[in-house]
Image (cartoon, helix red, strand yellow):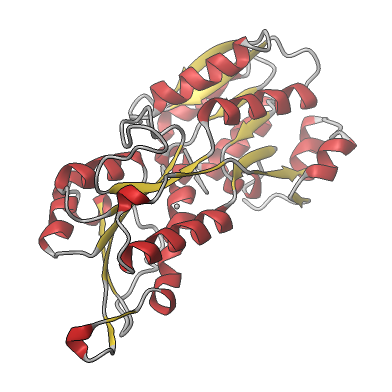
Amino acid sequence: MTNLSRFLGLERRRFIQGAAATVAFLPSLLSRPSEATGGRPAVPRVGVLGDSNPVGWFARTAAIDIECRWVDEHGRPLSVLAAELVRLDADVIIALGVEAARAARNATNAIPVVFVAAGDSVRADLVADLSRLRGNVTGIIVTSGVEQATAKVELLEQLVTGVSRLAVLGNPGNPELEIAMRDVREAAAARGVEVRPVTATKRGDLEEAFVRMARERAAIVLSDVVFATEACRIAALASASGLPVVYEAKSFVEAGGLVALHADGGAVIERTVAIVQRILRGEKPAAIPVEQLTRLKLTVNRHAADALGLALPQSLLARADTVIGAQACA
């Protein structure tokens, strides 16, 4: 399920949304027998921790008790929200994103934590390595950062002939920016491409950011909550700037952006459910290896390509998972 989000599924917010959809499957999948109830299914309590809940998909049912805690509910930090889930004696905590996973891990060494994070969670200090876990933590890593960045640089080279420099838009307020930018620099350097970082922290910074980005021939927009909420604005600015941009979430392409390489949300959901099932059936998190999902999906917008005067290679269209022919945002 990010930073669930650098996702899913996710720009980060879209990643969290897609990952959070995992919980929609839990009521039918996670009931378990209890000796105390004469063999009748007990009601497991699953805590869900993340930095935003824009949709509100969660509700208690007779089969499962879901307790969600989101930063933007009351403005409380993740550390406080994680402590609440511990006090509620959750059977397992699903942590959506690197920061949520770190908060949950720091709040308890007894309750199992299943993280879903985009990027390299080993470097984010969630697990010691992919086979040797820290006690109560396991989960899903969606793509490897450098591999994902390399795929994006290669995609830009397919779209724009002779790319020697590219702009990379990130938010300095995002704790994952340093790692994400390092990944892009490494991937670009391996192909002889220079990276020009550009930053924006709020909506009002975007126009000036794209003025700077337009000096280059291509760009990457990194995942971030602020950017996720401004998908239409960012896609429009890219088009007005005549700038081919690769995004990290399908929602940007649906909003009129050119192309996105993004995680397979369905696979993330399926694997997260499977891990939570195993824990509720008695397995220890330390015995469940962290899984890496490296499959990236490709979404292309023909309308955006036409507006930029780009001829999409047939080979690219043939391997695209989704081809969009219109602009969604007004």
Tell me residue 95's x, y (percent). 32, 51
Residue at the spot 51% in from the left edge and 54% down from the top edge: 268
Tell me residue 44's x, y (percent). 27, 73
* Left or right of 200 on screen, residue 211: right
Residue 6's place in the image compared with 91, above or below, is above
The part of the image, by quadrant, that contains residue 93 is bottom left
Q: How many marks?
A: 0
Residue at the spot 63% in from the left edge and 19% down from the top edge: 214
Residue 146's place in the image compared with 190, above or below, is below
Tell me residue 46's x, y (percent). 28, 66
Residue at the spot 50% in from the left edge and 15% down from the top edge: 197
The part of the image, by quadrant, that contains residue 153 is top right
- For the question of whether residue 17 can be seen, the reply is yes
Q: Nearer the viewer, residue 179 or 306?
A: 179
* Left or right of 107 on screen, residue 173: right
Q: Among all residues in the image, which is located at the extreme right? A: 314
Q: Nearer the viewer, residue 1 or 37?
A: 37
Residue at the spot 60% in from the left edge and 32% down from the top edge: 237
Residue 140's place in the image compared with 151, above or below, is below
Tell me residue 310's x, y (percent). 82, 30
- For the question of whether residue 208 can be seen, the reply is no
Q: Nearer the viewer, residue 279 or 52?
A: 279
